[in-house]
Image (cartoon, helix red, strand yellow):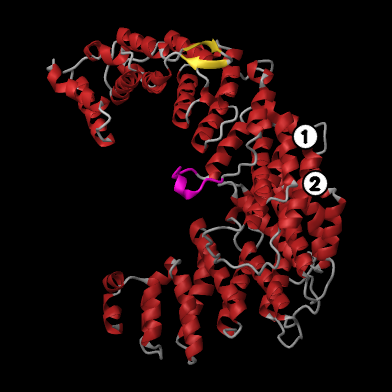
Amino acid sequence: MANPSLWIPHVEAFIDDSRSPNQKSASLDAIAALVKKDLLTLETLVRDMELYLTTPDHIIRKKGIILLAEILSRISGKSLNASTIGSLVEFFTSRLMYSSIVEHYLVMADWQALRGALIGCLALLRRRNTFGMVKGGDAKILAESFLKNVQVQSLAVEDRKLCFEVLQCLLDTFPEEMVTLGDDLVYGICDAIDEEKDPRCLLLTFHLVETLVRLFPEPHGFVADFANDLFEILGRYFPVYFTHQRSDDLDIKRDELSGGLMRAFCSTPYFEPLAVPLLLEKLSSSLPLAKLDSLRYLNNCITCYGAVRMMKYAESIWSALKDAIFTFSIPGFSSPSTVESVREMEPLGDQIAKETLACLQTAISELNHPKANSFLGLIIEDDGIEKAFNSVSGEKCYAVCSKESKRQLQALGSILSTSSKVSSVCCDRVFKKFFISLMGILEVTPNSPERSFIMKNNSFPKAVSFGAIYICVELVAACRDLTLSTEVLPQQFISMHDGWFCLLKSFATPLTCYLGSIVATLDNSISVNEDHKQEVTGYAVKGLQVLSTFPECCSPLSKDVFKDTLAILVTVIKDRPSDTYVWRLSLNALVQIGLFVDKSNDSQKAMCYEEFVVQRLLSWFSSDDSAVCLAQNLEAICEIGQWQGQLCRDFTFFAKVLLPSSASMVHISYFLSHMYPLQQFMIFYGGHGNKIF
């Protein structure tokens, strides 16, 4: 055993107020090291420290108890026998006790010892069975003493934090013993967390409630009986307003607090009668953060509470979501691009729009009950949706849409697209209701001219409905996403059981021809507002891209129509370099189609892509005399080449074309900087690389 002279100075150093925190921590580490090495037993330490642990001097007594507790925290991996652990539990539990009421105030018998007692209890409760742990009976006695004697909200924040950690550890480690405490446990926790304001403690209290309700799942159990009391406490924090400054150094974000509260809200269906009305009320708030949190919470509550409880709110939920979607759809949207800007902070309006659609998708998926109209039925049968559809899709003109019209159009497209992506059954209902009408508006029929229409028809439609094109493309994109949502989707299953697929397949070729004609034969002599023309062309390109990127097992396009789609996009790259907007949209579409083909391992589409995209771009490169065309073709080759293995195989051909051409070193450098690091270039293409450089 270690000579007392080796460790008693460390005890004295810890007690000494003149020592720095680092020195005190080093003293604790030194004593713990002796215990770990069996040079000092806990029994000896406690016996020889008796004066520090029982002295009437409350300052010394406080520090002595904290020292013992901190030593226990540092030796969690040290084996201790049951007798030692039991004695330590009894010692620290006794320090939790209060005296009687004096003049209407609770006075602690040994309040100076409380922090050390809490640290010691926590250290003991966290021990694992491998090294000796607290017995269930002792844990129950500790919990009873805690609930009876410790008035958590009268303590300082650090001590409250320790209290919540002790309670959490009791619930996590000794659930069977805690259940036997019944309503004393539930009431005690309610009392402990009520009026808590510190963010660090709030995170613990939210998780504490989440754990507590799992212990009492019975419909007539203690949590069900105390549901109103528990939710009254939780509801005060919603929505979370986090006003602490960075200088507070709490290292806690608002989203963490909000997420913890949301999990507590969703932890038991017994909160439903109180939580859902509160969320629906806050959905109408003028404060964006309140609206955003309401959507997130409602989304999770729908799933957690279940259809039986939530169906009675279906109409109210749909009304609230519809208002939010039509209010927060992003106005003035531009035509689609495959390259999205990365923003450090997404605007709140955009976040609300996304969360609303996520909640809508959950509601459609979950809120179905045999005795009530499904949530999707509310959408399809909504007079407002019917009116909006007729308004934004029916008019055939080139007139510039107002911002409000665009907002309505995007909102409607989002609702129908989101509804279609939930399941094949939902997709069927949406398609039967809206898709055939859209085809009629666009004058696209199954009997329309097929693939020759793309390449031979030289007239752009004189009047088009951008609204119909937009919604049509959004619906087709939703179908494509639905097919990609499962890894294996047999073609036989789709064709036999999914009406939407049969419907789409019957219109896919003429629809592709219609969209292709817009992209390929746009008559620039027509006096059309440029912004509107770009919107129409942009969604026509997106439509071609979407139709070309269905999985092989359920592609609505034949091989020939797929080839024509690639051909029309490549032709734009070659023949319309001055139309920068359409040129870049077409290039981005080709890149995305190539990425899809490469990922899907579709050998037939890969061969088509090789022939109609890669080979054509390479063959056209040497015939361009214009420096502008050369630069754009080089850019197109680089954009496609850096994603496509085909170009790597054809690089020798490209080098042969490049060397005798009029390409400047600037163009060559552009290619190299986008395609290959110099070292790789020299290794793989040594001969041509040396000649170029």
Is residue 3 found left or right of 301 in the rendered image?
left
User: Does the magenta stretch mainly form a helix, a strand or a loop?
Assistant: loop
Alpha carbon of mark 2 to alpha carbon of mark 1: how far?
14 Å
Label 1 is placed on what type of residue?
Met
What kind of element bears circle 1?
A: helix
Quadrant location of the C terminus in the rendered image:
bottom left
Graded by Cα atoms within 10 Å as few (under 14), some (14 to 19) or many (20 or more), the crowding at tag 2 reads some
> 642 and 105: which one is in front?
105
What residue sits right under mark 1 in the picture? 311
What residue sits right under mark 2 in the picture? 319
230 is higher (above) or lower (below) than 583: above
Quadrant of the rendered image containing residue 119:
top left
Task: Tell me where the magenta segment starts and ends, as one range.
Answer: 243-252
What kind of element bears circle 2?
A: helix
For the point 58% across and 13% down, which residue is it?
Answer: 184
290 is higher (above) or lower (below) than 73: below
- The residue sitting at the front extreme is 103
Quadrant location of the N terminus in the rendered image:
top left
Image coordinates of residue 684 in percent, x first then y, are: 29, 70
Is residue 26 found left or right of 342 in the rendered image?
left
> 24 and 504: which one is in front?
24
> 322 and 522: which one is in front?
322
Quadrant of the rendered image containing residue 394:
bottom right
Image coordinates of residue 611 in percent, x first then y, are: 51, 73
Is residue 569 found left or right of 463 in the rendered image?
left
Is any part of residue 458 visible from this angle?
A: yes
Label 2 is placed on what type of residue?
Ser
Which callout, 2 or 1, points at the residue further toward the start of the chain? 1
Image coordinates of residue 315 in percent, x first then y, are: 81, 41
